[in-house]
Image: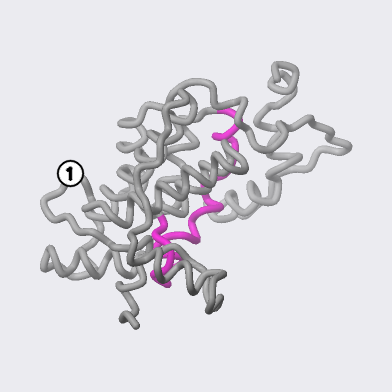
Amino acid sequence: MEDKKKVLTRRDFLVSAGGAAAGLALAASGLGILAPKAEGAMVDLPEYPWTDYFNKPLDVEAVRAKGTAYYNQGLGCAEGAFRALLEELGEPFSYVPSQIMNFGKGGVVAWGTLCGALNGAAAAVSLVFGGQAMTMIVNELLAWYSATALPLNLEHRSVAGNPLCHASIANWCKVSGKKASERGPRCAALTGDVAAQAAMYMNQVLEGTFVPAFAMSEETKACFDCHVGGYADDTLGKMDCKGCHEGH
């Protein structure tokens, strides 16, 4: 691992692995230029996943503060959560341009699908862990988000019931009496909370103390057992069904 770290520089990374993304990032910043190419560049990049480079616990509260701040700076929920985690992880994670997650704001360019904060945090987790560890963390993160009154430290908190931006915003509007267009401070705080929760789970996996706490409800499991690979075998998902569907 040490040999790989010696040859991995920011310039090498951007040239060999992220040239296209870096070019897009520069274009988005207004520079309108692409990253220069280096002839014959050959770099030993870390093999995916980059688990070996995550070797010390993250500062959970620093991640929370950064996620909130980046949202307020205009990065949005997905890029804000992603960047907060990558910066705390350090190199080589911090070499990845955070702009690649900008599409996730508002549940993917305001389509109201997967909450951007979840999207960005999950992407960061995926860079660190592969396979089962990634699946466990992201699964727990989505379950926690669906069942927790968020944001954690604001007056008006609401439970989304599922990981969708659409439901999250709608339920918050009902609880707060505010309009969706007034969601800024709420979504900023939520971005920090989600990134921090992901950081906490990552620390627990690193320390060997991670234990999933959220389980599918019996009602949802009954639907799942029939409709997801069971008798009906006609859909896919783990979300609470009754939020959108009536029982039968």
Q: Nearer the viewer, residue 144 or 14?
A: 144
Q: Quadrant of the C terminus?
A: bottom left
Mark count: 1
Residue at the location (69% across, 51% down)? 20
Task: State whether residue 23 appears in this view.
Answer: yes
x, y percent for residue 9: 68, 27
Q: Name which quarter of the figure residue 195 lies in.
A: top left
Residue 108 lies in magenta, yes or no? yes
Q: Quadrant of the N terminus?
A: top right
Q: Please state the extent of the stretch shown in magenta in the rendering.
A: 91-116
Does 196 sit above or below residue 56? below
Q: Which residue is mark 1?
A: 153
x, y percent for residue 68: 31, 44
x, y percent for residue 180: 23, 69
Mark 1: give few (<14), some (14-19) or many (20+) Cα within 10 Å. few
Question: Seen in the image, is 131 located left or right of residue 121?
Answer: right
Q: Nearer the viewer, residue 58 or 161?
A: 161
**Element under disc 1:** loop
Does 147 sit above or below residue 174? above
Question: Seen in the image, is 47 located left or right of residue 77?
Answer: right
Residue 14 lies in magenta, yes or no? no
Residue at the location (38% across, 34% down)? 200
Does 160 sit above or below residue 70? below
Task: State whether residue 68 appears in this view.
Answer: no
Q: Amino acid at mark 1?
A: Asn
